[in-house]
Amino acid sequence: MLEYEAFEEKTINRQEIFKGKIIEVALDEVALPMGGTSYRELVFHPGGVGVLAITPENKIVLVKQFRKPLERVILEIPAGKIETHEGRSPMETGARELEEETGYQAETLEHLTSMYLSPGFANELLHLYHAKNLKKVENPLAQDDDEVLEVYELTLSEAKEKIQTQEICDAKTIYAILYWETLFLRERN
Amino acid sequence: MLEYEAFEEKTINRQEIFKGKIIEVALDEVALPMGGTSYRELVFHPGGVGVLAITPENKIVLVKQFRKPLERVILEIPAGKIETHEGRSPMETGARELEEETGYQAETLEHLTSMYLSPGFANELLHLYHAKNLKKVENPLAQDDDEVLEVYELTLSEAKEKIQTQEICDAKTIYAILYWETLFLRERN
């Protein structure tokens, strides 16, 4: 087993390229552990939260929204960025996004997993929660004012069909649906 | 159900921020469907491939490598970027990365799913394959010259433990392991 030093790429120089509202971009020149140097293109992101929310009718709650990088609308689990400056925990962010985007509140949010989405160039960490015992809220929190969303509730087989047709096509949602499916599989064992 | 026009964000102006070897970064000013404008920070990426490879001993093949955005080593399934200019299909890229990184060749690569890792700001699409009937190659393709890798083979329960300890912590690998687990669950049904 190699020691950590055999892997580490030390930064020789960092060029700051962009400081946006959401991401920051940098170009690092690094010293390679086997000698020599290379460049690493880096994106820093505050991280996000996604919520697997299943209704009492055993349907998954999804939101349809336009995603500019893809130039199309897709169906995703409720999700949002962590707003570091607002001091909310990932779980509080999850509860808030669920209510804002879908009008549901959950009795509990169980942490399922946290995953780096694209560790080759980005440090974005996505925390995934399972919202339990949903109920509709009379006066939910308002949505963000630059988002248009439409809420859908699908059965497991409907959701799997939407993966086939690629209306569902993002990692957190595909993972959440596979996780939901394992709950059925485990029940039957 | 809302029409597409109710969601679409038309680009008014695009500012090109960075053209790297791997990613390109842009800042779009967009016209919002409900009126008004906003900005979208965008990262364009050629996409990648990941390979769930299970040995005849029923172990998953993983590679340990340093990831600069995280400043640490993690364990991942074999993976790589799509090199568009080299004209290789995603499946060919998967076969090649598997051999280069682990020394294994597969009889077949079955497509499992393709997922956008971070559709809020990036268009990166990851194609996931299941490599079947692995065999060790006598003289495998050489690794990329700026990567230090170490290969591990883990049982399902060892892999799940590495998720708990966060040595395994990226979306494609966590998804691949959950998928592998469903194969066991389905067998038992």
Image (spheres, coloured by chain):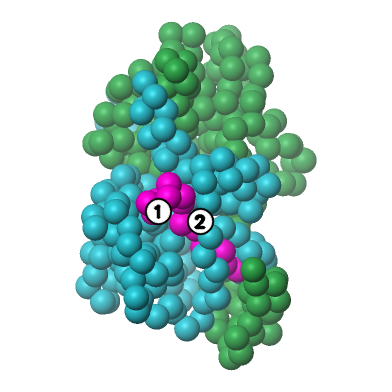
Chain colours: A green, B cyan
Q: Chain of mark 2?
A: B
Compared with A77, A11 (above or below) is below
Compared with B12, B9 (above or below) is above
Q: CA distance from mark 2 to mark 1?
A: 8 Å
Compared with B28, B102 (above or below) is below
Query: Which residues fall within the magenta stretch?
Result: B53-66
In the picture of the structure, the residue carrying the numbered disc 2 is B153
Compared with B42, B163 (above or below) is above
In the picture of the structure, the residue carrying the numbered disc 1 is B55
Please indicate, yes or no, whether residue B110 appears anywhere in the rendered image.
yes
Label 2: element kind = strand
Q: Position of residue B167 (x, y in %)?
A: 63, 53
N-term-proximal mark, 2 vs 1:
1
Q: Which quadrant is the N terminus of chain A positioned in?
A: bottom right
Q: Horizontal placement of B47 versus A91: left or right?
A: left
User: In front: B92, or B118?
Assistant: B92
Most extreme residue toward the front is B57
User: In front: B143, or B85?
Assistant: B143
Q: Residue at x 56, y 46 (%)?
A: B159
